[in-house]
Amino acid sequence: MAINYNLSKVYALSDNDPEFVMQIITLFVTEVPEDLKQIELGIKTKDHKLAYSYAHKIKPSLDLIGMTVAHQEILEVEAWGKREGKRKEINDTFASVQSQIEKAVKEIKKDFEL
């Protein structure tokens, strides 16, 4: 049972097409963790544009997968990158996003045998 994600938007968007759902979740589990590494690098190196662009890229995925809290927090990371904020203010927020995505990816892989 999905605890860390909610696929209701994916099913609604796909008219309950299981093939489409599999494509979406496969993309999520393969691309989003890689994108997170780029955000982390951007934060560590104060490359605000890098952090912003990857936060912006994964934002719709978090919304689509029903990760409401992570979606709100990635908006904060995106805003931090846009306004070139201080690093310490974003570390906890990014750690929270990272943790939520790791849990969701693990759960999706188990639930869909990926």
Image (tube, rainbow, N blue to C red):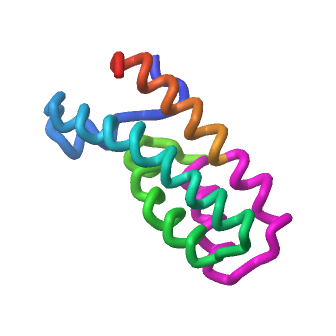
Q: Residue 110 placed where, x, y %?
A: 44, 17
Q: Quadrant of residue 24?
A: top left
Q: Which residues are magenta?
A: 70-96
Q: Nearer the viewer, residue 77 or 30?
A: 30
In the displayed structure image, the side of residue 86 where residue 97 appears, left or right: left
Position of 108 relative to 48 (above/below): above
Our reading of the magenta stretch's main secondary structure is helix
**Quadrant into which the N terminus falls:** top left
Looking at the image, residue 30 lies above or below residue 59: above
Identified at 49% across, 49% down, the residue is: 34
Residue 37, horizontal then vertical, whole percent: 58, 52
Q: Position of residue 15 (x, y in %)?
A: 14, 38
From what the image shows, is residue 16 above or below residue 91? above
Q: Residue at x 33, y 36 (%)?
A: 25
In percent of the image, x 40 and y 17: which residue is there? 111
Answer left or right for 31 relative to 103.
left
Quarter of the rendering occupied by the C terminus: top left
User: Is residue 75 part of the magenta span, yes or no?
Assistant: yes
Q: Position of residue 62 (x, y in %)?
A: 46, 49
Point 65% across, 57% down: residue:
40
Residue 66 lies in the magenta-colored region: no
60 relative to 87 in the view: left or right: left
